[in-house]
Amino acid sequence: MKIISFPMRIIKDVLKNLDPIDLINLSLASKKMGHLIPLADTHHFRVDLEHFLIISINEKQYNIQLLKNVSSRVTVMITIDNAWPAREWLHIYWNKKWTELLVHILQVFKCPLTTVNSKSMPNSKLIEAMLILSAEQCESKKIYIHQDLQKKKSLKNIIENLNITERLIITRIGTITRTVIGGVSSQRR
């Protein structure tokens, strides 16, 4: 029996009852299924990039590992109100780089990347994420970057090409040095 052959209302009800990881795995089954995923109101999901790729819905967080190497299976830890240890472990069956998974999630869920926080990410992963976000023209609401990273010429050029809709915040250990809101920069001392 094919899910796609059901009436749209039933498909929508079924999709709304699935967790984001099931939706991701379902979207990988076929392009047709991928196009149906937004029926689950995924545009309301909060997607953050820190030391994990985090999808939040209400009080639940789905923490997706950012693997260095290509793997056929990516581990996901589920937490409630960011309380550790993980409540449950799931898997996404993905055999490409983590940056491609990030773009896939944003495109299939049709939601922006809510926050990128460089504080908890290695520089190499941050630059890799910025490159792919810039190349794919993915929308990001807020990006937090440490001042020492902002001095890197490659990152500076990448930042200029990002689609940041709310804030780019550049910090120096503990203080905000510059905030850019809608293209207008403000300096703080």
Image (spheres, helix red, strand yellow):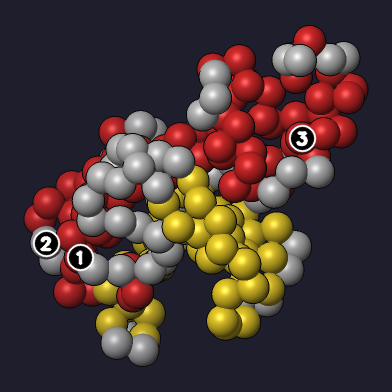
Disc 3 packing (10 Å; few <14; some 14–19; many ≥20): many
Q: Mark 1 points at which residue?
A: 123
Residue 22 left/right relative to 11: left
Quadrant where the image shows the C terminus: bottom left
Q: Mark 3 points at which residue?
A: 15
Quadrant where the image shows the N terminus: top right
Q: Which residue is farthest left?
A: 153
Label 3 sits on what residue type? Leu
Label 1 sits on what residue type? Asn
Q: Where is residue 66 in the image (x, y as percent from the top left)?
A: 35, 57
| Mark 2 vs mark 1: in front | 1
Q: What element carries label 2?
A: loop
Decide if residue 136 is in sight here.
yes
CA separation, marks 2 and 1? 10 Å
Q: Residue 152 carries which label?
A: 2
| Mark 3 vs mark 2: in front | 3
Decide if residue 114 is in sight here.
no
Residue 119 left/right relative to 147: right
Judging depth in this view, the residue of 131 and 77 nearest the camera is 77
Q: Which residue is farthest top?
A: 5
Q: Position of residue 105 (x, y in %)?
A: 51, 40
Residue occupying the point 57% across, 29% down: 27
